């Protein structure tokens, strides 16, 4: 790539990073794109492989958001924060997602149950994670000062919102 092209790309990235409206639109685009990927990963018929893929999507999303906001990123810290955030709120809900994933091992009804629940919960969790980090980064936060316990209520509300969005997305894909 030429220096002129690289300079132009850098100018555009800086413009997005410095304009709150453009940055917000870009952040929401990152979240929604990764919700779609996580929902699709939840459809994978191999038990627990779906959950591994969803986790990879969530880590990728966090990296994309840190790039957008110019926040330092390390993969291990990102994974740890996502795990802690989910673990602080979702033992029951994600337990249902894991059960949905494991249900895929049962022929017939279990497979159908797993294919109906896992994608929605994967999309909802990804949506909530994305929205939580967008709010944190918008307020000037970094990964180093992120406190999952402080975000529990906001995560819960975004998870519920994400279930609705993910369920309608899954229905649209099935149609």
Image (spheres, grey):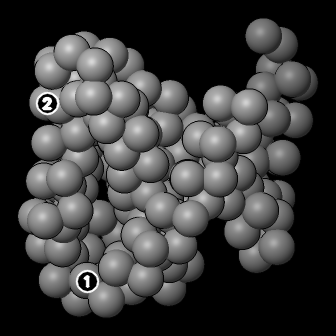
Q: Position of residue 175 (x, y in %)?
A: 74, 31
Q: Which mark is residue 102?
A: 2
Pointer 2 or 1: first along the chain: 2
Q: Quadrant of residue 133?
A: bottom left
- Mark 1 — residue? 152
Q: Is residue 108 above or below residue 40?
A: above
2 or 79, nearer to the observer: 79
Residue at x 89% of width, y 24% of height: 4
Element at badge 2? helix
Quarter location, residue 7: top right
Residue 144: x and y in percent read: 22, 68
User: Which quarter shows the N terminus?
Assistant: top right
Q: Nearer the viewer, residue 160 or 4?
A: 160
Write the residue at 25% across / 83% down: 152
Q: Position of residue 88 (x, y in %)?
A: 12, 73
- Binning the other alpha carbons within 10 Å of mark 1 as few (below 14), some (14 to 19) or many (20 upward) gives some
Label placed on residue 24: none
In this view of the protein, can residue 58 be seen by the observer?
A: no
Residue 18 is left or right of residue 76, and the answer is: right
Tag count: 2
Name above or below for residue 61 compared with residue 82: above
Residue at 68 percent across and 32 percent down: it is 173
Pick the residue in front: 145 or 11: 145
* Viewer can see residue 146: yes
* 112 displayed left or right of 95: right
Q: In the depicted view, which residue is nearer to us: 108 or 150?
A: 108
Q: Decide if residue 35 is on the left or right side of residue 51.
A: right
Res 142 → quadrant = bottom left
Q: Give the structural element (helix, strand or loop) at label 1.
A: helix
């Amino acid at each position: 790539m030429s220096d002129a092209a690289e300079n132009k790309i850098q100018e555009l990235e800086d413009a997005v990073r410095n304009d709150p409206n453009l940055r917000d639109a870009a952040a929401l685009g990152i979240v929604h794109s990764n919700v779609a990927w996580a929902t699709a990963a939840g459809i994978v018929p191999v038990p627990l492989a779906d959950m591994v893929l969803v986790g990879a999507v969530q880590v990728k999303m966090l990296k994309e958001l840190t790039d957008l906001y110019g926040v330092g990123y390390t993969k291990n810290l990102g994974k740890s924060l996502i795990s802690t955030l989910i673990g602080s709120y979702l033992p029951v809900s994600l337990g249902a997602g894991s059960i949905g994933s494991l249900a895929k091992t049962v022929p017939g009804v279990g497979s159908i149950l797993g294919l109906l629940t896992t994608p929605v919960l994967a999309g909802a969790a990804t949506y909530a994670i994305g929205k939580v980090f967008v709010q944190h980064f918008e307020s000037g936060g970094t990964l180093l000062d992120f406190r999952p316990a402080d975000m529990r209520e906001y995560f819960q509300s975004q998870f519920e919102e994400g279930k609705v969005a993910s369920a309608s997305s899954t229905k649209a894909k099935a149609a």
